[in-house]
Amino acid sequence: MCNRYIIIALALCITLNVAAQKKRTTTKKPVAETTTINPRIERMVQNTQRIVFIDSMLVPKSDMLNKIILTPQAGQITCNSQDFTYQNEIGTKRIFAKNNRLYTQQKAWQTFDEETELNGIAVPGVIDSLNCPFLMNDGQTLYFAAKGSESIGGYDIFVTRYNAETKTFLKPENIGMPFNSQADDLLFIIDEGSNIGYFATARRQPEGYVCIYTFIPSDSRQTYNELSYQQLERLADIRCIADTWGDGTQRTQALQRIKNIKPAITNNTPSIHFVINDQTVYKDITEFRSNENAERYQQLTHMQQQLQLLQTTLQEQRVSYEKAADTQRQQLRKSILDNEKKMALMQKDILQLEKQIRYSEIQLLK
């Protein structure tokens, strides 16, 4: 009897052991989740532009133009319903959005001529739903917002440039991060009169609101070196503008420039002072006999502003050179010499353009 109980107990142990083994073999180990990164977005993050962001403010999208104060040189931007219009400083050119396309108008004497679509910019499905145009003072560099396969989500900011030889705009390019994201990124402005940029985005914002960032424009695109991908992601998404301040000197100077901005003139005929000859001095932009010369004058003003900025930079570099250590002086010396050559060329170009405008107007006055 005792042996029979022992046999039964052993059988039960074997059965339980087999069942436990089966249970162990059928239990699946948890699989670690993997995050797939879009290769295009990854490349854009790695090429994030180095930008100093000055400040930011949350505003209703419908009110964002009222929060941006521009100098007269930047021109004027207005919005009718959802469509934005840019008009240059002298009031001779408009670029505006209509039916998801961009159009332009030129002013002939006191009235604007028929609207003309900017050809070659809109490509259905690739670069579509164009809006928010802004033209730089050079009259050639155009920024705008658009959707399509070339954007990474919603609206992105694009840039194109006018080719004077073919009289068409070049293929637009996505300006990348930190200005573009997987949310709607909208208005992009560079006010050369104050050397301040403005940029509006809907990322991380409630419905119907945008965040307007002020930033310091850069003459050339510079990226970050020796940063981890996580650090670059943070900068690309503008998680904290203080990350871009460095020692804070540039930001302090920029804040002072913003304080000194005088609002853009509301009429379309800003005052000027341009000597034609001993008897004639133009004091109003409408006095030019041709629109081409009026636009040339705007280009001349732009070049003079750039020359002033370069002169200020040179002065600062020379002061820094006197205080710099020997190891830093070599680099500063090269930069100073390069800027001096650049300044001499700019002065020559300004003088030549001024003469061209004056000669052309004298011929038209005869």
Image (cartoon, grey):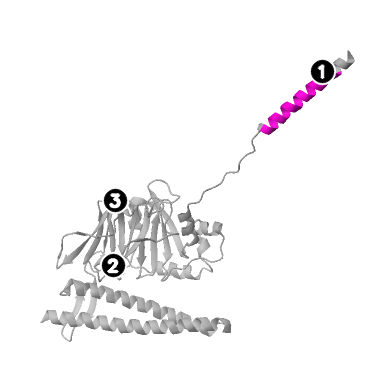
- Residue 267 left/right relative to 35: left
Task: Tell me if residue 68 can be seen.
Answer: no
Q: Secondary structure at mark 1?
A: helix
**In terms of secondary structure, what is the magenta stretch mainly?**
helix
Residue of label 2:
162
- Residue 10 left/right relative to 197: right
Q: Secondary structure at mark 3?
A: loop
- Residue 358 left/right relative to 64: left
Q: Secondary structure at mark 2?
A: strand
Q: Give x and y (percent) for residue 109.
A: 14, 68
Residue 202 to residue 172: above or below: above
Label ID, residue 82? 3
Label 1 CA crowd tier, 10 Å (few <14, some 14–19, many 20+): few
* Quarter of image, res 260: bottom left
For marks 3 and 2, give the one nearer the viewer.
2
Q: Nearer the viewer, residue 47 or 19?
A: 19
Which residues, given as a range, are shown in magenta?
6-25
Amino acid type, residue under disc 1 in the picture: Ile
**What whole-number distance in Å separates the C-alpha atoms at marks 1 and 3?**
85 Å
For marks 1 and 2, give the one nearer the viewer.
1
Q: Give x and y (percent) for residue 211.
A: 41, 54
Residue of label 1:
8
Residue 101 to residue 268: above or below: above
- Residue 250 left/right relative to 144: right
Residue 354 to residue 42: above or below: below
Q: Earlier in the sequence, mark 1 or mark 2?
A: 1
The residue depicted at 12 percent of the width and 80 percent of the height is 365
- The question of residue 22 being in magenta is answered with yes
Task: Tell me if residue 180 can be seen.
Answer: yes
For marks 1 and 3, give the one nearer the viewer.
1
**What whole-number distance in Å separates the C-alpha atoms at marks 1 and 2?**
94 Å
